Amino acid sequence: MEFTSDFMWGCASAAYQIEGAYNEDGRGMSIWDIHSLNKDVVAYNENGNVACDHYHRYKEDVQLFKQLGIKYYRFSISWTRVLPNGIGEVNEKGLQFYIDLVDELLSNGIEPIVTLHHWDYPYELYKLGGWMNPASPEWFEYYTKIIVDALSDKVKYWITINEPQCIVGCGYYTGTHAPFVHASIIDMITMSHNILLSHGRAVKYIRENAKISPQIGYAPTGPSFVPEDDSEEAIEEARLKTMSMKNSGFFAITWWSDPIFLGKYPDDAYELFGEAMIKPSEEDMKLISQPLDFYAVNIYYSSSIRGDGSTYETNSFQGAPKSTMNWRVDEIVMYWSCKFLYERYKTPILISENGIANIDWVGLNGKVEDPQRIDYISRYLLCINKAMEEGIPVIGYMYWSAIDNFEWACGYDKRFGMIYVDYQTQKRTIKESGHWYKQLIESNGEVLEQYKMLYK
Ligand code: FCB
């Protein structure tokens, strides 16, 4: 197999989805705390108040992570646990939690990857206009400073923002994530630009001030299209659709990655948004486009559609393999995404999320048997391997998720974890996939060798 000897094997999570302790030790409220109080925006009207109670159980959880054999753990910081009002006074107890978590991980041989922002935006800043406010990039820099000053003597890997597509696209366009609203195009452009500037300020701060030499990335997602067949035309069509604004608008890869990696907004954004489109200054684009060490990307399934909007028969037939999210098991997207992203952005790729929600429960034998998850991970990894064989540098894989958690608007129903959580008792059980992952990591992927021929 092509996995390099330093391939980064890990798992990922996000603060609001696992921590709970929403009103303890001085934590302030985020838009998810406040807006999930609305009726019927989250399945069963659930919320992250308790979640996996990771805030109190992080030591037990780190021991379980160790049993998964992971070398890296990607987690995010709850902005309002550290800065209850988003800016201003630091909540020392909240900050201490992350210092302790980092220490606990490192002393158990697990390297932390810190995501600064994974959607739980401070409600107090939202009241001031949130990402619409021209001061929002400064707020983000201030928050970054607090975290970097406290953790960068031990943390080397940083991811600024997770899936900005969903911040704007789901939060303000489809209205399916907090704050569950529909904004105007011009407002969504303003927010996008401020998010990109926030990223830029954070990168600059980390680069100039981190105590140990940092590795910095950013974790967008975005609709990726796969070719309908092997022909050159189909490949070109998939490439163009993947890198176009037309099909995807605020969810597009290029909207969120061209400014950062190419230093300019995509040309078709000007066509799509016309008069509403921003005319950014050179100075802004310079700040936004500082070099990054890796392109972190969350990849789950492809958005393959034909020109007429209908789906490919090859992946959308009745009974096609799907997860409980109704997301297709569609591993070849991993290969094509890595290929198209590397062609365009020429930056080593870290798969910062990939995983499956499955129907899991603790069996009579006490085990959580989840063969679909093992098969799913194998398929996607084989497609990463195929990309690596073609010389595309993929530096690591973070399975989403380490532990079952609060899946945003879908609540607790969707179980992505390698560790099962009984939410009535908070009892954890490592799923069979978790035990298998350990062997996979120990063999550096060699256990997949038997299937390699299937992905030639
Ligand atoms: C991604 C999110 C992550 C989780 C997975 C299933 O879009 O970044 O928090 O919800 O999907």
Image (cartoon, helix red, strand yellow):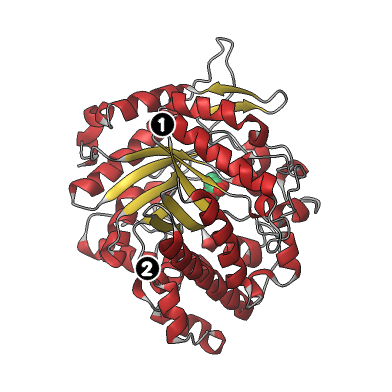
- Give the residue at the far top of this rendering: 365
Secondary structure type for disc 2: loop
Instruction: Give the amino acid at mark 1.
Output: Gly
Secondary structure type for disc 1: loop
In this rendering, is residue 227 above or below 187?
Answer: above
- Front position in the image: 9 or 241: 9
Give the label on residue 109, or none: 1
The N terminus lies in quadrant: top left
Question: Considering only order in the chain, which callout, 2 or 1, is on the residue closer to the N terminus?
Answer: 1
Q: Residue at x 53, y 42 (%)?
A: 13
- Front position in the image: 255 or 142: 142
Closer to us: mark 1 or mark 2?
1
Quadrant hosting residue 420: top right
Instruction: Give the amino acid at mark 2.
Output: Met
Q: Badge 2, how many Cα within 10 Å: few under 14, some, many 20+?
A: many
Q: Report whether 406 appears left or right of 202.
A: right
Coordinates of residue 313 in the picture (x, y in percent): 39, 50
Coordinates of residue 372 in the picture (x, y in percent): 44, 29
Coordinates of residue 101 in the picture (x, y in percent): 55, 38
In this rendering, is residue 397 above or below 277?
Answer: above
Q: Is residue 298 at least partly visible in the picture?
A: no
- Give the residue at the far bottom of this rendering: 275
Q: Is residue 59 at least partly visible in the picture?
A: yes
Distance from disc 1 to disc 2, alpha carbons, whole Å, reads 39 Å
Q: Badge 1, how many Cα within 10 Å: few under 14, some, many 20+?
A: some
Give the label on residue 369, or none: none
Identify the residue under disc 2: 243
Q: Report whether 283 appears left or right of 20.
A: left
